[in-house]
Image (tube, rainbow, N blue to C red):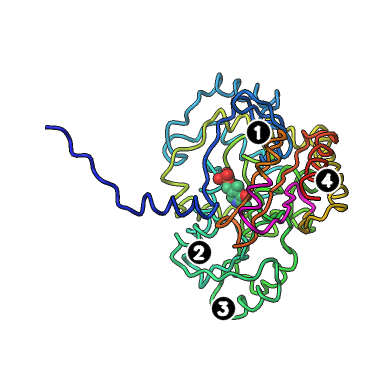
Amino acid sequence: MMPVRRTLPDWIITTVEERKSANLYRQTEVLNAPQSVSPVIEGKAFLSFCSNDYLGLASHPTIVKALAEGAERYGVGSGSAHLVCGHLSPHDGLERALCDWLGVDRVMLFSTGYMANLAVLSALGRHCDTVIQDKLNHASLIDGAKLSETSTRRYLHADLQSAKKLIDKQSRPTLLVSDGIFSMDGDIAPLKGLLDLLLESEHLFVVDDAHGLGCMGSNGLGSLSLSGLSASSVSALIGTFGKGFGTAGAFVACSHEMAEYLTQFARPYIYTTAMSPAMAYATKVSLELIRSEEGERLRHRLVSNIELFKQRMHSLDLALMPSSSAIQPVMIGSSARAIELSALLRNEGILCTAIRPPTVPNNQARLRITLSAAHSHNDIHRLCDTLERFVN
Ligand SMILES: *Cc1c(COP(=O)(O)O)cnc(C)c1O
């Protein structure tokens, strides 16, 4: 007898159709060459302004070689969770190197930033009265708070008054969480101001600096360093390796006591396979590069690209956002218009994604331009010249 083919409920199809007709449909695309500022799609070379590879390390020869060497020496798979038998010496070596760089007691590794955020928020949130978050925090922080089963309150973006109102309402200790650099807006959180609001010492303060660590601040120490703070100023600092570091994975940096707690109670740490030891090995080499003179040179290059872009855009009739990071969104408004501009740029060989709701609020569709140390000044001029033609 033929197996019965199950019919899908209507909503599987209709909801996707709705996304299409609202200009919100998304799909993947295959790159046939390494991630870089000049990726190849269907045999055609593009100039890309949409990856988060801010320092150009994703296909840097030193890191590529390190991954191969790590695999030769320690194999590919970790084979198990950290707490069973999947914690190899490259994991330990990377954790120690991160502790030294950040000046913290302990670092714990995760396979992705998404999981690190689920882990920290679910484990800490459940003992807090409320989880208080910036309105524009990353989706993984919002989801982590849901997993904690504690209610979330969100304050107006980067607004200290609004955050204070929520904090003052709490009777029991609360968990305040913010992105360091906001992923869709590129601006930096008022970290010092937020810290000053947490007068009661039992309040927890968690910062996710996925877009700042490695590529901003002195020694690449990110948004905390730009705010005159350090990793030890906060209860936990989350960083990711898939952006500035050019590899994959994430970490949480914290005190010894916090690490002990998370190790026992953070389920997304406990019930998952440890990251590849080869990846941990390569990431340690990436950290060494970030801390070296070459890292400093790359950060300077990135800053100079950001300055050139902002200077060129100043003369155009397009709204930039108050960002001095590598994320430079050009606000468009309508999703249809953002897609149209993205397609026009693409015809000219320039890749730049239209970011639309629900990733950003309604009517705030934008071109999210991300700059890299690997861009040349000519690349930036080419982008701005092309934008100028289509906008004016
Ligand atoms: C990208 C990002 C993450 C997720 O990190 P992955 O390693 O890509 O899962 C978390 N937080 C912020 C702010 C991010 O931008």
Where is mark 2, residue-wise?
Answer: 125
User: Are there few (<14), some (14-19), or many (20+) residues within 10 Å of tag 1?
Assistant: many
- Image coordinates of residue 214 in percent, x first then y, are 72, 42
Give the number of the mark in front: 4 or 2: 4
Residue 70, label in figure: none
Q: Secondary structure at mark 3?
A: loop
| Dot 4 amino acid type | Phe
Q: Residue at x 48, y 70 (%)?
A: 151
Where is mark 4, residue-wise?
Answer: 309
Q: Residue at x 49, y 58 (%)?
A: 143
Where is mark 3, residue-wise?
Answer: 170
338 drawn magenta: yes
Q: Nearer the viewer, residue 359 or 384?
A: 384
User: Are there few (<14), some (14-19), or many (20+) residues within 10 Å of tag 4?
Assistant: some
How many numbered dots are placed on residues in this image?
4
Task: Identify the mark nearer the N-term, 3 or 1.
Answer: 3
Task: Identify the mark nearer the N-term, 2 or 1.
Answer: 2
- Image coordinates of residue 172 in percent, x first then y, are 54, 76
Task: Identify the mark nearer the N-term, 2 or 3.
Answer: 2
| Dot 2 amino acid type | Gly
